């Protein structure tokens, strides 16, 4: 396979995420004005999807197919999955933070990554509400609107602000909530923003010291993982038994915060 031109992939991801973000902002305005966006539920009754999620995914899939017809595509709503023949695959969460979007809480984003067999080559998280675009290129660093990103160097857990989230399955979130109750007594504090891709982008930007959540799908973290590693952080995939099943998680942060949380997890019995 010829070496891919990373700046072309990056520009395509940025342009596409911004275009999808503008379309979603239009849906958000119409929703605020009283339009029902055809909300339905997916994996559980807590897990919503709307016409906005689907329209954003169609837009992204169309733009990527026009520009890169032979690449693979994995999108959360599953409307345009393709295997591809180039060895590259786009991993897309067209709207991360759908519950926030549904309630008018301004914490949702578009997440687009392009990966090869070794992981993400480029990762873009676009936040239309704050007009912030977080961009990472493998080996090329991570930026927010051109300014370099760096994870924090929080050294001890009592100085570590941790972002987390809860999967949609009730048993898993109950068990994790009990772990989080313990964590609250150990770390500086815990935040639950409600959009995993934003959590990772904000960890890369130093707004959180670390991020830890179980039961994510690849589209939730494909872009954010590269943002964190290119911002000098560490990302690992711990496994924990929650809700009676082994769940793979994402643990991200600066080296000390990451290792401190890994040790904390390792010291806890599984559920
Ligand atoms: C969800 C959000 C949430 C996380 C869930 C994800 P969605 O994605 O990222 O913060 O806790 O695990 O499924 O459904 O809004 O795209
Ligand atoms: Ca998501
Ligand atoms: Ca989503």
Image: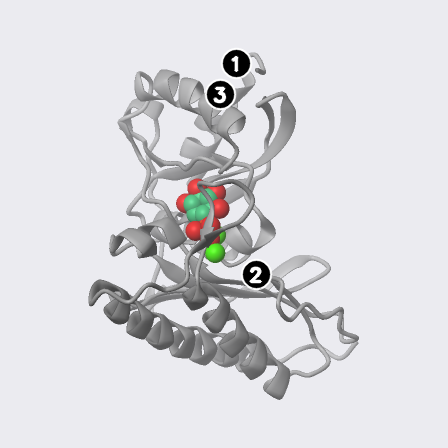
Q: Which mark is residue 175?
A: 3
Q: Report the residue at 52% width, 70% height from top.
A: 57
Foreground mark, 3 or 2, reads 2
Q: Residue 227, position in %: x, y?
A: 46, 57
Q: Residues within 10 Å of mark 1 (few under 14, many from 20)?
A: few
Q: Nearer the viewer, residue 229 or 166?
A: 166
Secondary structure found at label 3: helix
Secondary structure found at label 2: loop
Distance of mark 3 from mark 1, alpha carbons?
12 Å
The residue beneath circle 1 is 268
Q: Nearer the viewer, residue 20 or 29?
A: 29
81 displayed left or right of 33: right
The residue beneath circle 2 is 77
Distance of mark 3 from mark 2, alpha carbons?
27 Å
Foreground mark, 2 or 1, reads 2
Distance of mark 2 from mark 1, alpha carbons?
35 Å
Q: Residue 134, position in %: x, y?
A: 38, 64
Q: Report the residue at 72% width, 70% height from top.
A: 82
Sequence-wise, the earlier of marks 3 and 1 is 3
Q: Which mark is residue 223?
A: none
Q: Residue 54, position in %: x, y?
A: 50, 67
Q: Report the residue at 73% width, 80% height from top.
A: 70
Q: Is residue 146 visible?
A: no
Position of the C terminus by quadrant? top right
Q: Is residue 1 above or below residue 246?
A: below
Position of the N terminus by quadrant? bottom right
Secondary structure found at label 1: loop
Q: Residue lying furthest left in this view?
A: 33
Q: Residues within 10 Å of mark 2 (few under 14, many from 20)?
A: some
Q: Nearer the viewer, residue 196 or 56?
A: 56
84 displayed left or right of 146: right
């Amino acid at each position: 396979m010829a070496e891919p031109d990373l700046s072309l992939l990056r520009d395509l991801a940025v342009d596409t995420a911004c275009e999808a973000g503008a379309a979603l902002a239009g849906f958000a305005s119409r929703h605020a004005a009283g339009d029902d966006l055809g909300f339905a539920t997916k994996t559980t009754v807590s897990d919503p999807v709307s016409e906005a999620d689907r329209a954003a995914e169609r837009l992204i899939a169309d733009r990527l197919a026009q520009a890169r017809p032979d690449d693979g595509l994995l999108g959360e709503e599953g409307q345009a999955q393709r295997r591809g023949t180039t060895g590259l695959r786009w991993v897309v969460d067209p709207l991360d933070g759908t519950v926030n979007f549904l309630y008018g809480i301004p914490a949702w984003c578009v997440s687009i990554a392009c990966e090869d067999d070794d992981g993400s080559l480029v990762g873009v998280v676009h936040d239309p509400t704050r007009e912030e675009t977080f961009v990472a290129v493998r080996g090329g660093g991570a930026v927010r609107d051109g300014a370099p990103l760096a994870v924090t160097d929080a050294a001890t857990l009592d100085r570590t602000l941790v972002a987390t989230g809860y999967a949609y399955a009730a048993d898993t979130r109950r068990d994790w909530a009990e772990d989080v109750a313990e964590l609250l007594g150990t770390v500086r504090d815990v935040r639950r923003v409600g959009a995993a891709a934003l959590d990772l982008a904000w960890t890369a930007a130093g707004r959180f010291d670390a991020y830890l959540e179980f039961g994510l799908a690849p589209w939730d973290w494909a872009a954010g993982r590269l943002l964190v590693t290119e911002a000098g952080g560490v990302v690992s995939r711990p496994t924990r038994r929650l809700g009676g099943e082994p769940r793979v998680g994402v643990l991200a942060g600066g080296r000390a915060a990451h290792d401190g949380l890994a040790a904390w997890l390792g010291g806890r019995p599984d559920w």
